[in-house]
Amino acid sequence: MSLKGIAIDVETADPHSVGNAAAILSEIASRLKKFAASGETSLIDLKSLPFSPYEYEQLRFTLGRGEISANLDAIGTSEIIETQFPGVWWVTHYNVEGDIVADLIEIAAVPNILLSQPEDVRAGLERLHAIISQSAS
């Protein structure tokens, strides 16, 4: 599958624009190309980049929403949204007060935060064994 067919149109009507929306879209395309070719995953930290409010919304609009979304509740909420481009995820972490503490674009088949951690799997297995032992007695 070629990425050349992905049309990206960014309008800059904001006089305070610093041009980051177009640059980020190009960076996303480059990283998505690497991911498609080699499986190499990556993150782009949006909070570390200067965006005007218009550019931020334009980026969100251009990436759009795909078919998958998830919300996690752990020391605050995390919102994981597949964009309209498979393999490109918008991951936003909020603190308990609702402030954004991390805003990321993740290039991956599945965002890392959704993967079961080995220690959690082991703890779950122990709980399952305990339930099986109790029900057998």
Image: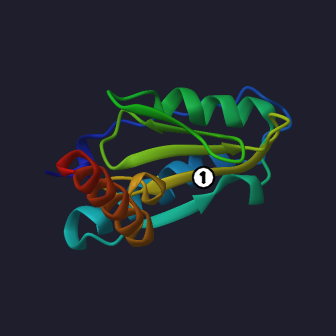
> In the image, is residue 92 above or below residue 123?
above
Q: Position of residue 26 (x, y in %)?
A: 48, 54
Residue 54 quadrant: top right
Foreground of the two, 102 or 43: 102
**Residue extending furthest toward the left:** 1
Residue 70 quadrant: top left
Who's the residue at 43% across and 63% down the image?
A: 120
Q: Position of residue 75 (x, y in %)?
A: 71, 47
**Residue 112 appears left or right of 47:** left
Crowding near pointer 1: few (<14 within 10 Å), some, many (20+)? some
Disc 1 target residue:
104
**Residue 94 appears left or right of 66:** right
User: Could you tell me the amino acid type at mark 1?
Assistant: Leu
Q: Position of residue 107 (x, y in %)?
A: 41, 57
Who's the residue at 35% across and 64% down the image?
A: 126
Callout 1 secondary element: strand
Foreground of the two, 121 or 40: 121
Q: Position of residue 137 (x, y in %)?
A: 22, 51
> In the image, is residue 79 above or below residue 48?
above
Who's the residue at 31% across and 62% down the image?
A: 125
Which color scheme does this rendered protein use?
rainbow
- Count of number-bearing discs: 1
Who's the residue at 84% across and 32% down the image?
A: 15
